[in-house]
Image (cartoon, rainbow, N blue to C red):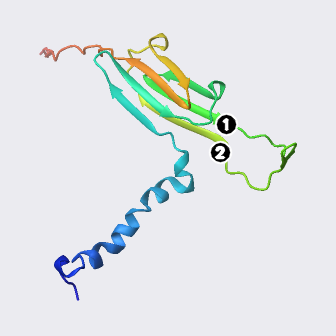
Amino acid sequence: MLMPSIFGENLFDDFFGDLDREMRHVDRRLYGKNAAREMKTDVREHDDRYEINIDLPGFKKDEVTLELDNGYLTVTAAKGLDKDETTKKGKLIRQERYAGTLQRSFYVGEEVTQTDISAKLEHGVLSISVPKKEAKKLPEKQTIMIEG
């Protein structure tokens, strides 16, 4: 029997309990077991620019590339691991470090050029500064006369 919360139980626990447990695992189903490896990103807007901060722990400067193509800024981070399993440190029996490629794209506008964008990788955080540029104005609507 469902009882109000004044009796020590929540009226909706039985009804929403299973749904609540399912919702906690949605991100695991969406991103798979590698959910922790996605590129966590913060975007801040300033008066003259956008600031993008991406968490890339463990990546070095030469493992990260930025490309600008048709108004899209693409950030790619690729990491490989050493294949040598036996080193001076001993034989590797379990490895949880990430090896592979992460990629994320942002639309920054077709007016932005490569020289406008600045980036810095420091303490595992990639900071990108993208200036605000006004889009080219489209011509105003004009009516074309039809002959005849």
Image-quadrant location for residue 70? top left
**Label located before the other in sequence (1 or 2):** 1
Q: Which residue is mark 1?
A: 79
Q: Is residue 142 toward the left or the right of residue 116 in the image? A: left
Please give the name of the residue rendered at 36% of the width and 22% of the height, measured from the top-left corner.
50
- Determine whether the residue tagged by mark 1 lies in a helix, strand or loop: strand
Label 1 environment density (alpha carbons within 10 Å; few <14, some 14–19, many ≥20): some
Please give the name of the residue rendered at 56% of the width and 29% of the height, measured from the top-left corner.
123
Image-quadrant location for residue 145? top left
Please give the name of the residue rendered at 27% of the width and 77% of the height, measured from the top-left corner.
15
Residue 108 appears anywhere in the view: no
Q: Which residue is mark 2?
A: 98
Across and down, in percent, residue 37 comes to 55, 45
Tag 2: amino acid: Tyr
Label 2 environment density (alpha carbons within 10 Å; few <14, some 14–19, many ≥20): few
Q: Residue furthest top?
A: 115
The reply to whether the C-beta atoms of the residues labelled 1 and 2 are less than 8 Å apart is yes
